[in-house]
Image (spheres, rainbow, N blue to C red):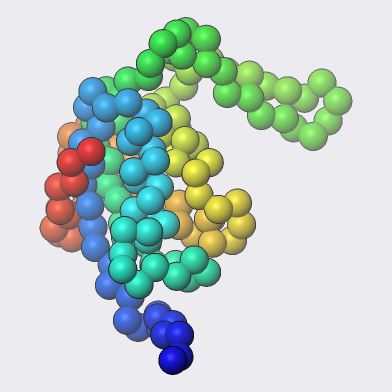
Amino acid sequence: MKTESIKKKDICRDWYLVDAADKTLGRLSSKVAMILRGKNKVDYTPNIDMSDFVVIINADQIKVTGNKEDKKAYWRHSGFPGGTKTKLYKTLDSTFIITKSIKGMLPHNKLGNKLITHLKVYNGSKHPHESQNPKLMEI
């Protein structure tokens, strides 16, 4: 028996709309990362971009549990000695927080960089992707 491999022309891409109002950051991120990865499809192939597009609205109403709102910090490093920059959760934009959370759950290679481009995050309830007729996904 031969193993069937999916071709690029056979991939069907859907659009999903996720309302992030009053959702927990980690739970929302893991569900969206699964959709972006393509693991919800029957013919999932790990080395091919099979992902669907995901539009997240109301990102500014996302919730975190515990004391994370006051204590969670995001840091980056310039590569030079003493080049650490730290910012607290409450000072950052919610679109950045959601995107960074989901990106951390995707593969850390060229495929992951391509998959994250299929994520669209917006603070309000308006988005410019109405013409794609996204399906409402409940999380």
Q: Residue furthest right?
A: 81
Q: Residue furthest front?
A: 1
Res. 63 image quadrant: top left
Vertical placement of residue 8 versus 65, above or below: below
In the image, 9 versus 79, the foreground residue is 9
Q: Residue furthest bottom?
A: 1
Residue at the image point whose x is 18% and y is 41% from the top:
138
Residue 62 x/y as whole percent: 31, 24
Residue at the image point whose x is 18% and y is 60% from the top:
132
**Residue 88 visible, this orientation:** yes
**Residue 118 visible, this orientation:** no
Res. 85 image quadrant: top right
In the image, 132 versus 54, the foreground residue is 54
Residue at the image point whose x is 79% and y is 34% from the top:
79
In the displayed structure image, the side of residue 51 where residue 57 appears, left or right: left
Residue 80 x/y as whole percent: 83, 30
For the C terminus, the quadrant is: top left
In the displayed structure image, the side of residue 5 where residue 104 appears, left or right: right
For the N terminus, the quadrant is: bottom left
Residue at the image point whose x is 31% and y is 58% from the top:
40
Res. 127 image quadrant: top left
Count of labels in the image: 0
Residue 28 x/y as whole percent: 33, 36
Residue 104 x/y as whole percent: 53, 41
